[in-house]
């Protein structure tokens, strides 16, 4: 299966370094090798492999190499300065593609060493819009239950999908987190992970999690930061004109893998919508240079709307997610009437799409499949 971002990556390779980041097993290595196959004489090197690591350290590839792919480069000490040196001394015909885990995605922390030398591409799991874009028949129910990571989504049966997820969880919690930080209380870390699986879509209280796990709120924040850094979870913050105020309020947490959600179909649908909206927001940010952010709305009185897409800190649209209820959400109606926002209610099971009281009621499947990816 092709990936929607391939053509965009190929175009950017002609201009700068491409940093391809995203969750483990989302398809970064596959797409890198697929692109490399189009450049005869290209070199793929993985820092985890001893022989490849020696070649990388010695920079002993041919100067005429048309495409240099460096995988897991972030594990090299001082990798940013290394990459700057490789880029600045290469022949102009050499293209450079760097792939790796979320630690490459330090957009605001790369410093001056790579300033102006790279384009970032975030490769997320498959979505309805991407499947449609590459000519595949989107399977809404399969995405809802298995998530969009290629291997479990494409697995021949549910058992294979569950086996993949079990190994994925074990790998994340036994290996990946230690590459970021030495966790002394692995039991508490796993408990945080398991609790977040049951609280998808609800504002997360660090204090409450701390009490449940018998650790401090500071430790909870650290553990969640690690899960975010590894592209396991992502946070959606409440919208506020003052961004600092927004970050101080309780975020909602979602999983990049919808299959990890433990809850009813409503929670799974909200998580799926969150991932696909985030993918849309990332595309607008990375490819159109739009200041686009995914938030949710919440008043001091507890009135809440699931999602709000904001551009340049102004709300563009608000979105409520319902599994089967086609009746207009009272809170959605409140925000639309008070502020005039474009309001959309997405319904998992819906016979007819309608517009009522300036609110559009849409099929979640159709809406998500039509989201722009570039």
Image (cartoon, rainbow, N blue to C red):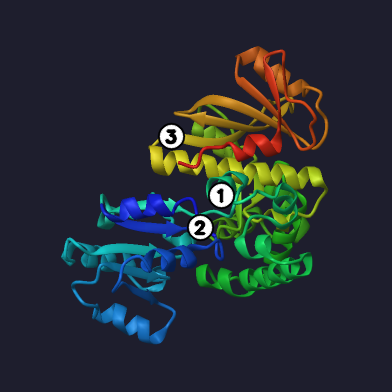
In the image: residue 275, left or right of residue 67: right
Q: Position of residue 198 (x, y in %)?
A: 78, 52
Q: Earlier in the sequence, mark 2 or mark 3?
A: 2
Query: Mark 3 packing: few (<14 Cα in 10 Å), some, or many (20+)?
Result: some
- Dot 3 falls on a residue whose secondary structure is loop
Indicate whether 70 appears above or below 370. below
Residue 109 appears in the rendering: no
Which residue corresponds to mark 2?
2
- Rendered image quadrant of residue 92: bottom left
Query: Answer yes or no: do the residues labelled 2 and 1 have beta carbons within 8 Å?
Result: yes
Which residue corresponds to mark 1?
135
Camera-nearest residue between 157 and 312: 157
Which residue corresponds to mark 3?
291
Indicate whether 119 appears above or below 333. below
Q: Position of residue 320 (x, y in %)?
A: 70, 31
**Alpha carbon separation for disc pair 2 and 1:** 9 Å
**Residue at point 77% right, 26% down?**
352
Q: Position of residue 368 (x, y in %)?
A: 63, 39
């Amino acid at each position: 299966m092709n990936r929607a971002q391939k053509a965009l990556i190929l175009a950017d390779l002609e201009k700068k370094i491409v940093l391809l980041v995203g969750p483990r097993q989302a398809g970064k290595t596959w797409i890198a090798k697929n692109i490399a196959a189009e450049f005869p004489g290209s070199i793929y090197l993985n820092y985890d492999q001893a022989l490849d690591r020696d070649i990388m350290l010695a920079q002993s590839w041919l100067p005429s190499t048309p495409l240099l792919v460096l995988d897991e480069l972030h594990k090299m000490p001082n990798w940013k300065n290394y990459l700057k040196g490789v880029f600045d001394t290469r022949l102009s015909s050499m293209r450079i593609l760097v792939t790796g885990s979320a630690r490459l995605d330090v957009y605001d922390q790369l410093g001056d060493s790579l300033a102006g030398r790279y384009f970032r591409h975030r490769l997320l799991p498959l979505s309805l819009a991407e499947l449609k874009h590459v000519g595949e028949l989107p399977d809404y129910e399969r995405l809802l239950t298995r998530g969009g990571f290629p291997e479990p989504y494409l697995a021949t049966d549910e058992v294979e999908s569950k086996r993949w997820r079990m190994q994925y969880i074990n790998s994340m919690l036994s290996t990946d987190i230690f590459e970021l930080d030495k966790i002394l209380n692995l039991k508490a870390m796993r408990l945080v992970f398991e609790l977040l699986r049951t609280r998808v879509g609800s504002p997360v209280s660090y204090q409450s999690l701390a009490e449940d796990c018998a650790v401090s709120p500071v430790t909870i924040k650290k553990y969640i930061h690690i899960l975010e850094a590894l592209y396991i979870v992502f946070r959606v913050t409440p919208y506020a004109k003052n961004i600092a105020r927004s970050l101080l309020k309780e975020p909602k947490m979602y999983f990049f893998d919808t299959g990890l959600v433990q809850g009813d179909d409503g929670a799974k649908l909200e998580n799926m919508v969150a991932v696909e909206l985030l993918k849309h927001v990332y595309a607008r940010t990375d490819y159109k240079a739009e200041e686009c952010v995914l938030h949710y709305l919440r008043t001091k009185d507890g009135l809440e709307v699931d999602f709000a897409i904001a551009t340049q800190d102004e709300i563009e649209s608000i979105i409520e997610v319902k599994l089967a209820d086609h009746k207009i959400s009272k809170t959605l109606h409140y925000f639309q009437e008070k502020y005039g926002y474009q309001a959309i209610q997405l319904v998992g099971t819906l016979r007819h799409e309608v517009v009522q009281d300036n609110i559009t009621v849409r099929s979640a499947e159709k809406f998500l499949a039509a989201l722009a990816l570039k």
